[in-house]
Image (spheres, rainbow, N blue to C red):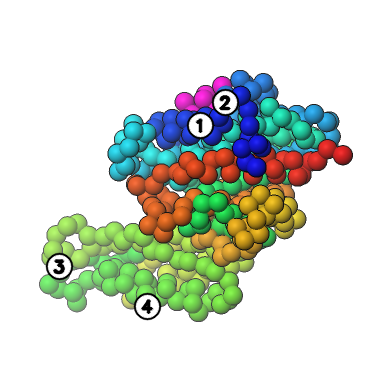
């Protein structure tokens, strides 16, 4: 079925694998995807698509009209950026750019969407218009928001938008679709504690901010367990503690704690903010010290629209069978800036299985590599989704 669906003059699977491995070998981080976007734009132009570049700095949009004109404007999105990560693989297509690596599979996402564009351009048996969005800077740099600020939805009359991410924890050949929350919001925070430094052998003459930090670290662990509803999910992770000069006999004046909050709902985030402010201020005050917390905006939660999620589920169920189409599995506490698109337009974001082995490297591992065997399946999903959402009468 897949071979028939994606059939063209050359072996599309081989082409997608070539594209994917080329991108993997030459990764580019947020807003530096110049070579990547040039490669994408060149391939889309070769297919005869209308192509727009430089959207959100390095983003690309390709436009393909179906055989039948219709007021249906559908967008499919792939992310292009790599991670600031040193690859430890030694295969032929390993990264040539030290400290940069496609450790999240964006090279595969780009190749699958290019494959779908190739198949649909060859056989445009659908109604309406499809927009192929190749987004920069997904990895914590708000590339989706930058494209929106650059007029993505004003320049193009997109009505619905869809995304897909590979998922190593899901067997290859399977899909997962959520009717609501898929990925969490992430928001960072900095806590600054100011006490009174001095001699380590004279603790009665100081006000030790390290002791205060220890109390705060323990107290913060109660925010989720004793404030958030048990049926809601949330995570607070303290990931950095900094203080001291390196001397063994000097108690520092200040200590800084840093971490991140992950939630699905705005009300939960506001509750966590309130509790953290209270804990920080009053814990320090109890030790006759001062402390403050600063919150850093991150990505919002990725929450699918139910009707669009149901459509995606029907597509994957027809594509791979009901036993390999998972409906409403547990969402992930990872974050994804596709969320900003879903705040503006209805759509859905799904997972495609990337591995049959529990020992396979996880996303963001220096040993990660996208599974090229799923490239045709991902492209087929995109094609079937377009055809299902805009059928010819």
Q: Are marks 2 and 4 in contact (CB under 8 Å)?
A: no
Q: Position of residue 112 (x, y in %)?
A: 56, 38
Please identify, in this view, whether the residue under mark 2 or under mark 3 is nearer the observer.
2
Q: Judge whether 198 appears above or below 350 on screen.
A: below
Q: Earlier in the sequence, mark 1 or mark 4?
A: 1
Please identify, in this view, whether the residue under mark 1 or under mark 3 is nearer the observer.
1
- Identified at 29% across, 68% down, the residue is 209
Q: Which residue is mark 4?
A: 286
Marks 1/2: CA distance? 8 Å
- Identified at 41% across, 64% down, the residue is 237
Q: Quadrant of the N terminus?
A: top right
Marks 2/3: CA distance? 74 Å
Residues packed near mark 3 inside 10 Å, few (<14), some (14 to 19) or many (20 plus): some
Q: Secondary structure at mark 2?
A: loop
Q: In the figure, residue 79 lies in which quadrant?
A: top right
Q: In the figure, residue 92 lies in which quadrant?
A: top left
Q: Secondary structure at mark 1?
A: helix
Marks 3/4: CA distance? 22 Å
Q: Which residue is mark 1?
A: 14
Q: Earlier in the sequence, mark 2 or mark 3?
A: 2
Q: Which residue is mark 2?
A: 10
Q: Earlier in the sequence, mark 3 or mark 4?
A: 3
Q: Judge whether 10 appears above or below 134 on screen.
A: above
Q: Are marks 1 and 3 in contact (CB under 8 Å)?
A: no
């Amino acid at each position: 079925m897949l071979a028939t669906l994606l059939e063209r003059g050359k072996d599309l699977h081989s082409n997608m694998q070539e594209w994917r491995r080329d991108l993997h070998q030459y990764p580019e981080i947020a807003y530096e995807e110049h070579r990547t976007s040039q490669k994408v734009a060149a391939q889309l132009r070769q297919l005869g698509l209308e192509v727009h570049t430089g959207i959100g700095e390095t983003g690309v949009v390709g436009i393909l009209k179906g055989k039948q004109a219709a007021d249906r404007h559908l967008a499919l999105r792939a992310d292009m950026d790599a991670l600031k990560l040193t690859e430890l693989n030694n295969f032929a297509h390993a990264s040539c750019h030290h400290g940069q690596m496609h450790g999240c599979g964006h090279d595969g996402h780009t190749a699958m969407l290019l494959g779908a564009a190739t198949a649909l351009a060859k056989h445009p048996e659908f109604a309406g218009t499809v927009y192929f969005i190749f987004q920069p800077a997904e990895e914590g740099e708000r590339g989706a928001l930058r494209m929106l600020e650059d007029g993505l939805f004003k320049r193009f009359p997109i009505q619905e938008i869809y995304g897909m991410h590979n998922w190593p924890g899901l067997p290859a050949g399977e899909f997962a679709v959520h009717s609501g929350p898929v990925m969490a919001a992430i928001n960072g925070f900095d806590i600054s504690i100011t006490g009174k430094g001095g001699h380590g052998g004279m603790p009665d003459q100081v006000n030790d901010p390290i002791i205060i930090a220890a109390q705060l670290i323990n107290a913060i662990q109660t925010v989720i367990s004793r404030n958030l509803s048990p049926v809601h999910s949330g995570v607070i992770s303290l990931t950095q503690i900094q203080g001291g000069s390196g001397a063994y006999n000097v108690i520092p004046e200040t200590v800084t704690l840093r971490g991140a909050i992950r939630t699905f709902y705005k009300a939960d985030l506001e509750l966590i903010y309130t509790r953290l402010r209270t804990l920080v201020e009053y814990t320090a005050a109890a030790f006759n010290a001062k402390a403050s917390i600063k919150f850093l905006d991150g990505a919002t939660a990725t929450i699918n629209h139910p009707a669009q999620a149901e459509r995606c589920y029907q597509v994957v169920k027809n594509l791979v069978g009901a036993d390999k189409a998972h409906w409403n599995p547990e969402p992930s506490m990872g974050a994804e800036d596709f969320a900003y698109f879903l705040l503006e337009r209805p759509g859905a974001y799904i997972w495609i299985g990337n591995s049959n082995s529990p020992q396979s490297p996880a996303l963001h591992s220096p040993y990660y590599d996208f599974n090229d065997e799923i490239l045709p399946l991902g492209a087929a999903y995109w094609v079937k989704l377009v055809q299902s959402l805009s059928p010819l009468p």
